[in-house]
Image (spheres, rainbow, N blue to C red):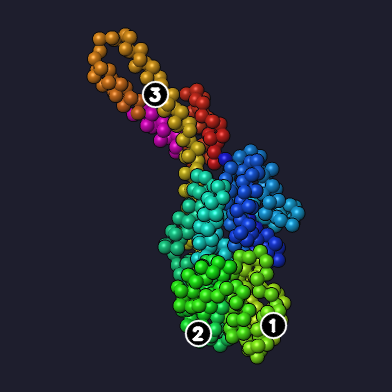
Amino acid sequence: MTIVSLSLSYRFTSADVLEKLAVPSEQRGSVLTRLHALPTIDEVVLLSTCNRVEIYASAHGPIAEVIPAMAGVVGGRLQVDQVMRMARIRLDGAAAEHLFSVACGLDSMAVGENQIVAQIKDAARAAAAAGTTGPAITGLTDAALRASKRARSQTTISTEGISLVRVGLDLADVHLGGLAGRAAVVLGTGSMGKLAARLLRDAHVGRLSVASRNPARAAEVAAEVAGTHLLVSDVPARLAEADILITATGSAETVVPAEPVRAARAQAGGGPLFVLDLGMPSDVDPAVGPLPGVTLVDLTALGQHLADREAHDQIPLVRAIVAAEAAAYMDRQKQAGAAPVIAAMHAHIRQLADAELERLKDRLPDLSEQQRAETAVTVHRILRKILHRPTVRAKEFSSGPKGPVYLEALQQLFDLDAPTEDVHAA
């Protein structure tokens, strides 16, 4: 088994290409099913956020064949070679360390941001619902979340870090001369939409409206922030009196076209409207940006704004945690690879002992049942003591670079039948 990661992120991929690669929530199940159907993939999870599309899979067989196949599934209208040029491929420990870094917020536009934790959990739930994960990938995502929890509790990466939503609202605050008393509309109730609604409430906006393609969800979030809920179809009319519009829907199509916004702003007398588009692909038609009185800020603009920020002084500490957690994870994986060999060794020795105890019945027929039971207990106790040290050493050796060699030697020494692919599991 090999852990394979194929990553396309804002670091190496332009925003317009990421828009084409983004997997909307309603399409995630079908994409996962197609990935899982690839001949060499056993388990797979898909992480698609506003600034990355990443696949983590457990695979067997020739890895050189599975990677282009994965790229073909997520590439959509792009050619496989185009995707491969932009993608970063990582295997085993490197794949784990990258996911752990992502979970800790080290690979985010806004270093230390918390939304990625909810996004990884959501990706894991979606893969479980699609039936594409098992112990390998579930163990990987669980370990990444544990690393994130440790980093955020032992450093200030999270408390001092900022989110894309907060950065966008800071820009809105400067542009509008304050948020207090302003009328705001939030379109989308995922993790980013909910955060936007909460931050707007904390900024003491005046009228706060929440809309979603799921009306019940909109009502729930609106109630949480003491706002009102809308149908998506009601948003254009509400823009006539809004100062701020934040979108984060995860839709594959444009949700806010230019014409309704033009009409709403004309009705408002050309007053200022700050539009923060957190969608990937974009929720807002780019033609909204040039409209009179409208300021449109999308993920590309946020990335440019964040590029000049000073490096977070907690980053080295978090990187050390990531490296330690990734190493520990790989040790556990290698030790798990030793389990079939160790189990086979124990079973082999037990079988030999049981066979000798059966022969003892014929040689000493006058022994009582209690004597036979005591003899069996004593024999197995001695065997457990004899096997204890080889078992411990096998687990220790399996974690090292020559682990497969030691396990192969153990197989040959005891003439065991443990599956070869389990012995060499990474």
Q: Nearer the viewer, residue 36 or 51?
A: 36
**Amino acid type, label 1:** Arg
Q: What residue lies at 47% left-to-right and 44% top-to-bottom? A: 332
Q: Look at label 2 and name its amino acid.
A: Gly
Q: What is the CA distance from the residue labelled 1 to the residue labelled 3?
A: 80 Å
Front position among marks 1 and 3: 1
Q: Quadrant of residue 355?
A: top left
**Local secondary structure at mark 2:** loop
Mark 2–mark 3 Cα distance, whole angstroms, equals 75 Å
Which of the two marks, 2 or 3, is nearer to us in this view?
2
Disc 1 and disc 3 in contact, CB within 8 angstroms = no
Three-letter code, disc 3: Arg
* C-alpha gap between disc 2 and disc 1: 23 Å
Q: Residue 387 lies in magenta, yes or no?
A: yes
Residue on which the image places disc 1? 262
**x, y percent for residue 322:** 50, 56
Of label 2 and label 3, which has the lower sequence position? Answer: 2
Front position in the image: 27 or 354: 27
Label 2, on which residue? 206
The percent position of residue 150, horizontal first and vertical second, equals: 43, 59
- Residue range in magenta is 385-396
**Residue situated in front as seen by the camera: 43 or 106:** 43
Q: Residues within 10 Å of mark 2 (few under 14, many from 20)?
A: some
> Which quadrant of the figure has residue 236?
bottom right
The residue lying furthest to the bottom in this view is 269
Q: Quadrant of residue 307?
A: bottom right
Q: Is residue 310 above or below residue 369?
A: below
Contact (CB < 8 A) between labels 2 and 1? no
Label of residue 350 in the image: 3
